[in-house]
Image (cartoon, rainbow, N blue to C red):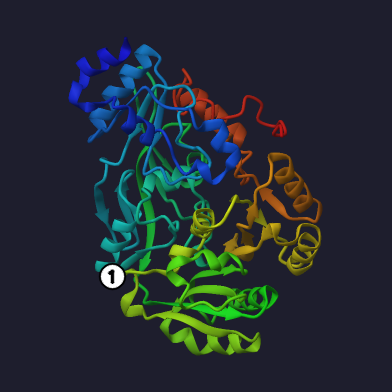
Amino acid sequence: MWKERLMELIGEENVIVKDSAIDRLSKDFYWYSPILFEELKDKVADCAVVPKTIDELTKIIRFAVKNRVPLTPRGAGTGNYGQGIPLNGGIILDLTKLNQIVQINEKDVRVQAGVKLGLLEKTLRKEGKELRIYPSTFMKSTVGGFLCGGSGGIGSIRWGNLWDGNVLEVTILTVEEKPQLLTIKDEEVLDYIHNYGTTGILVEAVLPIESRTEWSQYIMSFDTFHEAVMFSDELSRDEAITKRLVSVCEWPIPSHFQQLKKYLVEDKSIVMLEITEDAEGRMKELSEKYGGEQSFYIPASKYHKGLKVSDFTWNHATLWAHKHGENMTYLQARFDTEKVLEQMRRIREVFGYEVQFHFEYIKIEGNVTPTSLPVVIYKSKERLYEIIEFFEEVGVTVNNPHTYLLGFGGYNLRMEKITSLKEKNDPYDLLNRGKIPKEVNVKLAK
């Protein structure tokens, strides 16, 4: 049995085989999707290892190649699409002990893959710096997990997504008889991010950083979601206001935000903001224009101390709805900047509050864009795909979060290049096996 041989190689104490631990390490937040829950709930690895050095990781890779054992790299497991769930057993590579902040420079930081983004942001701010972007799960999520499974988050309204110059360099370990350390820079980096770790094991990265900014946090309330969206749209395009977060949730989504209930007004939609202190006056002028009122405020002096507005944005909004609502799931969508109100109107006419709107404003190639994470009351797989088809019919692009297949979950991934790199860097298809579709250009079966 290969597990016994692995224990002989690296020590019995270094191979995790306890059922409860293996089950935990084999799962991520796939249960956001009732479809993925049914497909992946029984998938588990045979064992897990937690390498502390590149040399230890290399030894494990050599063993896996020799014995043809599947490998699934893992960070903190905060992904939503089953990216880190092993489909074919094998070994979970828990990379959280590769957690060194290697070097902080004037304009960038070099870190190992297992560094938690929350710790990194805290460390940088002590040095007068900060990250450009990070997910709402940043207190738990790791650099490697975010780069391989994420896309954007807090800061994307200013800096865009990962592929908008927000990853400068990655170091990849190939899965071969003689694993190679590859340094990837410039345009080639795009083939190694948001690829579910299928083309090599990301062990180190260089990220751009900026000077520390003092961010104030606000929740502004509006009588209608349309007014909240119009305010957010104008604020997002106002370059006089420096911002890190513009997040809009229509009621009843905020009704699930337990820690904010005493601050929020029944039936009012909200906009959650992180802006500079000096932008408060201009922000409130715009808010009054659309009938908005301040419901909550955290001064810049308490930024990242205790309760954070970002705890209720991006897919954290979905998490709160899932925990405190009934049969809640979500979609990932991109509305047309010129037709967003009309698209919303048509969706509401057909589906009512079965679809509840949630927007995150970001920049794509420098253009302000209302991306969306609408909360959906789940009735059946067939009904969910009816909703997806109607979104597409009215011109809303949907990135389907209910599949573990890379490429079908969204984003304009370079699937042909990724497939080619997979064959080169992982010739025995051991790394996160099953996540790349066999036919790159086929339509996902419903």
Farthest top residue? 1
- Note whether residue 231 is visible: yes
Q: Is residue 183 above or below residue 269?
A: above
State the residue position of label 1.
Answer: 128
- Give the residue at x 44% y 58%: 136
Q: Is residue 79 above or below residue 357?
A: above
Provide residue 224's location: percent of width, then percent of height.
Answer: 68, 77
Q: Is residue 391 above or below residue 197?
A: below
- Note whether residue 172 is visible: no
**Figure quadrant of the N terminus:** top left
- Give the residue at x 35% y 65%: 130
- Give the residue at x 26% y 45%: 99
- Along the line of sight, the residue nearer the viewer: 247 or 347: 347
Provide residue 63's location: percent of width, then percent of height.
Answer: 31, 17
Tally of marks: 1
Q: Is residue 435 left or right of residue 207?
A: right
**Figure quadrant of the C terminus:** top right
Q: Quadrant of residue 385?
A: top right
Provide residue 271's location: percent of width, then percent of height.
Answer: 56, 74
- Along the line of sight, the residue nearer the viewer: 338 or 416: 338
**Element on which disc 1 rests:** loop
- Along the line of sight, the residue nearer the viewer: 367 or 220: 220
Provide residue 103's location: percent of width, then percent of height.
Answer: 25, 53
Q: Quadrant of residue 435?
A: top right
Q: Is residue 327 left or right of residue 166?
A: right
* Label 1 environment density (alpha carbons within 10 Å; few <14, some 14–19, many ≥20): few
Q: Is residue 4 left or right of residue 169?
A: left
Q: Is residue 396 above or below residue 289?
A: above
Q: Is residue 167 left or right of residue 2?
A: right
Q: Quadrant of residue 284?
A: bottom right
Amino acid type, residue under disc 1 in the picture: Gly
